[in-house]
Amino acid sequence: MIAPVERPALSQPSVAVVPLPGSTEQPVRTESSAALEATPAVLLLADGTLLRGLAFGARGTVVGEVVFNTGMSGYQEVMTDPSYAGQLVTFTYPELGNTGVNGQDLEASHPHVRGVIARELSPMASSWRAEEALEPWLQRHGVVGIRGVDTRALVRHLREGGAINGIISSEGLAPTELLRQVRSAPSMAGLNLAASVSTAQSYRWSSLCGADFDTRLQPQPTTPYRVVAIDFGIKRAILERLVAHGCEVTVLAADASVEQVLAHRPEGVFLSNGPGDPAAVASGIALARDLLQQRDLPLFGICLGHQILGLALGGSTFKLGYGHRGLNHPCGSPGNVEITSQNHGFALDGASLPGDRVRITHLNLNDRTVAAMEMVEQPVFGVQYHPEASPGPHDGDHHFQRFTELMARRR
């Protein structure tokens, strides 16, 4: 087993907190399109830090956890990933909108981010795949954004002090009122958001990636593997990779019972990614415990699903200071390193996992947190990062092959 190191305590913020202005004067608002393009907006953090900018996307007021993503591409996949539900996402890449949006890069039918924070917004899209510009797409889906803020200073503040609740507003509300709203909002710790993004009814998935330049197809079995996927906020790219590796997938809701799962006679069960605190997803943890009683049934979890597996095995999770959200996180073991795509704010405590039943196979090489694990005597494993790589590098795609190999052995 790879031993994780003890995590250090978070330091106090080193960035000066901007004092709240004493004035409650509201900006003048007008309905003209020219004025709308220059509508003032503010981002106020729960610690009192205030940043001023301009609105883009939908106009309004939204509260959520302020986090940051360090990827240089893939903003559309990030915005539609259900794992970002309840969050205001800061993009460290200095300009958004360059490549527009298209129907093939959606991870869900609509954006799940609660708000977007950007340095600059490109006035035009320059991609042969673009079907729509970013801003009207955000407006159509009601996603509030702020641009023109110093995202570098904001990210440094979050790295030092940790992820924190914040509020974006382009409605001219007084800072004192915004501070009241943001400080009354619940913390991400303890929130079960999986139920809010899960499917309302079961469905079958048999589609591959729509982009014809994605050549990651695998040899198909004569008979597809019957897989039940539990939707805690599943990404379309994960479903597409399961199909590419020879699976026929039935997707069930987050509160599915073990009887409902087994009624489909699965050869393997997949536990998906999703938002919120894994320890709060009681029904998912209970389901995983029940499925572990089927000792020969392969189980595979990604991100939240990986954490739920660890909790079902008796482990515990903790909230990371500012999370792992980007496309270049190194994970692995000595002599075996993968560059990975990540999006999570919680992690498994490696020391809490039962050492006689669980082996830690991968660590995040930046902070030595648990990146992957497996059961010693059962066909069960979990991966904290995102091997479907949407967006991101393809180093981890072999985990899907491992899942199908476990099902082939069971046959």
Image (spheres, rainbow, N blue to C red):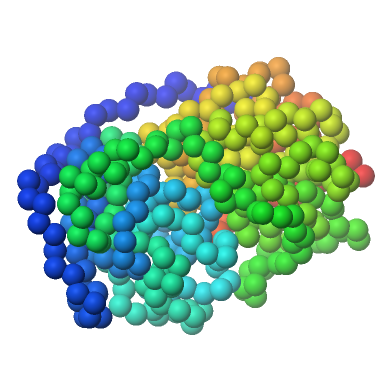
Q: Determine the residue located farthest toward the left in the rendered image.
A: 22
- Which of the pair 40/224 is nearer the observer? 40
The residue sitting at 66% across, 18% down in the picture is 355
**Where the C terminus falls, by quadrant?**
top right
Left or right relative to 255: residue 183: left
Q: Position of residue 169 (x, y in %)?
A: 27, 57
Q: Quadrant of residue 176?
A: top left
The picture places residue 166, in percent across and down from the top left corner, at 30, 46
Q: Residue 139: image x %, image y %?
A: 39, 71
Q: Place residue 120 in its image quadrant.
A: bottom left
Q: Nearer the viewer, residue 392 or 111?
A: 111
What residue is at 23 percent from the left and 37 percent from the top? 47
Q: In the visual, does 302 lie left or right of 49?
A: right
Q: Decide if residue 150 is on the left or right side of residue 100.
A: left
Q: Quadrant of the N terminus?
A: top right
Measured from the top left, where is residue 403 in percent x and y?
Answer: 76, 45
368 shown above or below 268: above
379 left or right of 90?
Answer: right
Does residue 198 appear anywhere in the picture?
yes
Vertical placement of residue 50 versus 246, above or below: above
